[in-house]
C-alpha cells in the first residue's frame, strides 16, 4: 500500500501516477494499457494509485523497479541515467525515512518539511543527483535539519534591495562543497524549506535561496543569470500588484525576492536571493502552512479532525482565500503566478480555518504581453519570461487546478470520500467575474497537466514544459 513511510510504495505510486496521466490508456475498470508494448497493468485505486500488478495470463505484482523497466520499454530509447535517477530517488527516500527525528514544535516548519514523497507526479521525485546521503542529509528538510550558513568575505555585487551586512556573502554549505570551497561558519542557524536550496532564517525573518548544482526533479537548481536579472524588476512589478490585491483580499501577500548578492568571479554558483520572510506578512493569530504540507500531512494538519461539514467549509474557505488573488493577478495585472503546491502558503486561524494566502517564487513567474516594454528592457528579443495569454493561461491552469487544487481536494476526500468539494471550488471560480478564459475553463472537459515523465524523453532544458490533458474536476454538466 502507498504510504508516506515506505520507499517502495512511494516510488511505485509516483511511476503509476505518471503512467496513468501521461502514457496509459485507462479503461472503465481502472486497468491501464501501455499502448506501444500492449502491457496491461492494474493498481489499487485510491487518492493515488498503488500496488501495481501486470497481467501475464494472471495478475502478478510488480516492484517499482520492474515498473520502471516497463516504462523504458514502452517509451523506448530511455534517456541516459533514467533508471538510475529512479533508483536514486528511491534510496534517498529510504535514507530520509531512516534518519527522520521527531517533528519540530513549529507548525509552519513541520508543514514545509513534510514532503517525504515529494512531487507525486514525477518519476524520480526525491533524486539528489545520485550523491551519497551523508553529503546531503545534514541539509535536508525531511530530517528537520538545522545548520549554519557559511559566510564568505570580500567584495560582492548586489542587485535590488539586499538586506545583508556589507562585505559578507552567505553561502550554502552543500553548494560550497560542490564547488570545492570553504569559508567561516556563521553563528546562528537556519532551516531548509520544502525547496532544499531555500532556507529560512527565523532571526532575520528572511528566506535565502541559493544555487544548488544538483538535479532535483526537472532542473539543476542553479540560479541562472537570466533569472537573477529578473529579481529586481519582478519585485517592482509585484509590489503595486500585491498592494492592489491585498486591498481586495486582505492578507494576500507575495513573499518578494527583494534582490540578490553574489561574487563577480562565481556569479551564478554563489548567488543568494534574499526573500521576504513570512512572519512579517502574517496577520495576528494566524499560522502559515505550506499547501503541499497540508496535502501530504503532518502532525497538527488542520484537515485532521474535521467532520464532514467542517471539511466542506474548510475547502470552500481554502479556495476562496487562495484562488481569487491568483486570478486577479492574471486578469487585472498580466502576472502569471506559478501557484503550485510548493509555492503557496495558506495562513490558518486558531480554529485551523484558511484566512490568508502567501505566494512565492519569482523564477517560475511569467508575464503577459502587456508587459512587453519591461520584457524587452530586461531580455531584449530573447528570454522566456513573456508568454502569450493562451500559454500563460495554460500554465496557470496547470499550477492552480491540476497541481494544486486537485491535491488539496484529494486530501479532503481521503478523509471524507463523498463530499462534493468541486461544487464549492466551481462556485468560487464562477463568482470571480465574467472572463472568457474562466468560462472556458469551467466548460472544458479537460485541464492541462505537466507531463514530467514524457518531458524526460523530449527535453534537455529545465524551463521546458509539455502538457497532457487530464479530466477537469471543475467541469460539471448543468
Ligand atoms: N506538487 C509539486 N509541484 C511542484 N514542485 C513540487 C511539488 N511537490 C514537491 N515539489 C518540489 O518542490 C520544488 C519545486 O521547485 P520550485 O522551482 O518551485 O522551487 P524552488 O525554485 O527550488 O524554490 P522556492 O519555491 O523557494 O523559490 C522541487 O524540489 C519539487 O520537487
Ligand atoms: Mg518553488
Image (spheres, grey):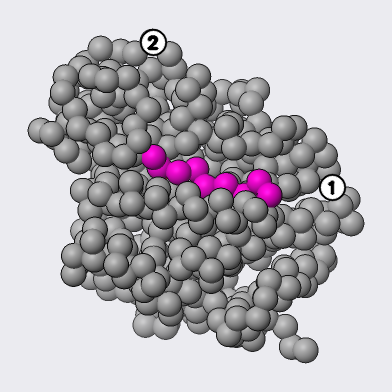
Q: In the rendered structure, find residue 306 and report the number of the disc placed on it.
A: 1
Furthest residue to the left?
A: 265
Question: The residue tagged with tag 1: helix, strand or loop?
Answer: loop
Question: Compared to 418, does 28 lie above or below?
Answer: below
Question: Compared to 466, does 264 lie above or below?
Answer: above
In the rendered structure, the answer to whether residue 381 lies left or right of residue 273 reads: left
Q: CA distance from mark 1 to mark 2?
A: 42 Å
- Residue occupying image coordinates x 28% and y 58%: 462
In the rendered structure, the answer to whether residue 365 lies left or right of residue 118 reads: left
Q: Quadrant of residue 389?
A: bottom left
- Residue occupying image coordinates x 70% and y 60%: 319
**In x, y percent, where is residue 201?**
46, 25
Q: Of circles 1 and 2, which is in front?
A: 2
Which quarter of the figure is the C terminus placed in?
Answer: bottom right
- Residue occupying image coordinates x 87% and y 56%: 308
Q: Is mark 1 within 8 Å of ligand 1?
A: no
Viewer-proximal residue, 250 or 62?
250
Count of marks overlaid on the render: 2
Q: Which residues are drawn in magenta?
A: 250-258
- Residue occupying image coordinates x 23% and y 27%: 176
Could one spot residue 95 in this view of the protein? no
Q: Which residue is mark 2?
A: 187
Q: Quadrant of residue 377?
A: bottom left
Q: Quadrant of residue 440?
A: bottom right
Viewer-proximal residue, 129 or 211?
211
Viewer-proximal residue, 387 or 81?
387
Residue 61 belongs to the span the image colors magenta: no
**In x, y percent, where is residue 169?**
26, 24
Could one spot residue 171 in this view of the protein? yes
**In x, y percent, where is residue 443?**
64, 86
Badge 2: residue crowd in 10 Å (few <14, some 14–19, many ≥20) = few
Amino acid at each position: 500500500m502507498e504510504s508516506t513511510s515506505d520507499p517502495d510504495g512511494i516510488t511505485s505510486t509516483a511511476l503509476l501516477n505518471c503512467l496513468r496521466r501521461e502514457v496509459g490508456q485507462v479503461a472503465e475498470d481502472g486497468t491501464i494499457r501501455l499502448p506501444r508494448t500492449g502491457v496491461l497493468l492494474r493498481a489499487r485505486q485510491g487518492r493515488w494509485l498503488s500496488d501495481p500488478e501486470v497481467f501475464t495470463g494472471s495478475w502478478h505484482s510488480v516492484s517499482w523497479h520492474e515498473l520502471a523497466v516497463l516504462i523504458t520499454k514502452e517509451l523506448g530509447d530511455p534517456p541516459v541515467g533514467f533508471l538510475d535517477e529512479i533508483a536514486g530517488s528511491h534510496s534517498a527516500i529510504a535514507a530520509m525515512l531512516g534518519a527522520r527525528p521527531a517533528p519540530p514544535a513549529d507548525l509552519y516548519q513541520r508543514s514545509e518539511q513534510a514532503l517525504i514523497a515529494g512531487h507525486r507526479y514525477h518519476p524520480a521525485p526525491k533524486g539528489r543527483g545520485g550523491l551519497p546521503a551523508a553529503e546531503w542529509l545534514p541539509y535536508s528538510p525531511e530530517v528537520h535539519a538545522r545548520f549554519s550558513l557559511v559566510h564568505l568575505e570580500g567584495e560582492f555585487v548586489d542587485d535590488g534591495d539586499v538586506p545583508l551586512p556589507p562585505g559578507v556573502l552567505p553561502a550554502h554549505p552543500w553548494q560550497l562543497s560542490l564547488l570545492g570551497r570553504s569559508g567561516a561558519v556563521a553563528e546562528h542557524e537556519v532551516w531548509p524549506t520544502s525547496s532544499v536550496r531555500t532556507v529560512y532564517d527565523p532571526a532575520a525573518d528572511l528566506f535565502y535561496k541559493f544555487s544548488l548544482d544538483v538535479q532535483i526533479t526537472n532542473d539543476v537548481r542553479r540560479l541562472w543569470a537570466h533569472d537573477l536579472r529578473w529579481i529586481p524588476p519582478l519585485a517592482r512589478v509585484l509590489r503595486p500588484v500585491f498592494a492592489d490585491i491585498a486591498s481586495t483580499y486582505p492578507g494576500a501577500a507575495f513573499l518578494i525576492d527583494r534582490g540578490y548578492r553574489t561574487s563577480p568571479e562565481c556569479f551564478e554558483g554563489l548567488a543568494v536571493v534574499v526573500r521576504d520572510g513570512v512572519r512579517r506578512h502574517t496577520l495576528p493569530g494566524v499560522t502559515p502552512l505550506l499547501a503541499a504540507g497540508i496535502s501530504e500531512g503532518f502532525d497538527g494538519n488542520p484537515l485532521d479532525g474535521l467532520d464532514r461539514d467542517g471539511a466542506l467549509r474548510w475547502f470552500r474557505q481554502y479556495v476562496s482565500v487562495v484562488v481569487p488573488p491568483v486570478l486577479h493577478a492574471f486578469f487585472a495585472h498580466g502576472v502569471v503566478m506559478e501557484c503550485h503546491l510548493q509555492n503557496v502558503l495558506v495562513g490558518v486561524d486558531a480554529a485551523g480555518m484558511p484566512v490568508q494566502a502567501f505566494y512565492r517564487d519569482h523564477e517560475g513567474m511569467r508575464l503577459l504581453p502587456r508587459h512587453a516594454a519591461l520584457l524587452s528592457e530586461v531580455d531584449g528579443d530573447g528570454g522566456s519570461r513573456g508568454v502569450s495569454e493562451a500559454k500563460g493561461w495554460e500554465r496557470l491552469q496547470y499550477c492552480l487546478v491540476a497541481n494544486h487544487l486537485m491535491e488539496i481536494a484529494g486530501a479532503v476526500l481521503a478523509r471524507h470520500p463523498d463530499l462534493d468539494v468541486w461544487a464549492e471550488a466551481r462556485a468560487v471560480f464562477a463568482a470571480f467575474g465574467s472572463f472568457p478564459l474562466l468560462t472556458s475553463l469551467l466548460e472544458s472537459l479537460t485541464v492541462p497537466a505537466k507531463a514530467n515523465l514524457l518531458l524526460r524523453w523530449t527535453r534537455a532544458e529545465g524551463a521546458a514544459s509539455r502538457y497532457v490533458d487530464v479530466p477537469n474536476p471543475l467541469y460539471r454538466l448543468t
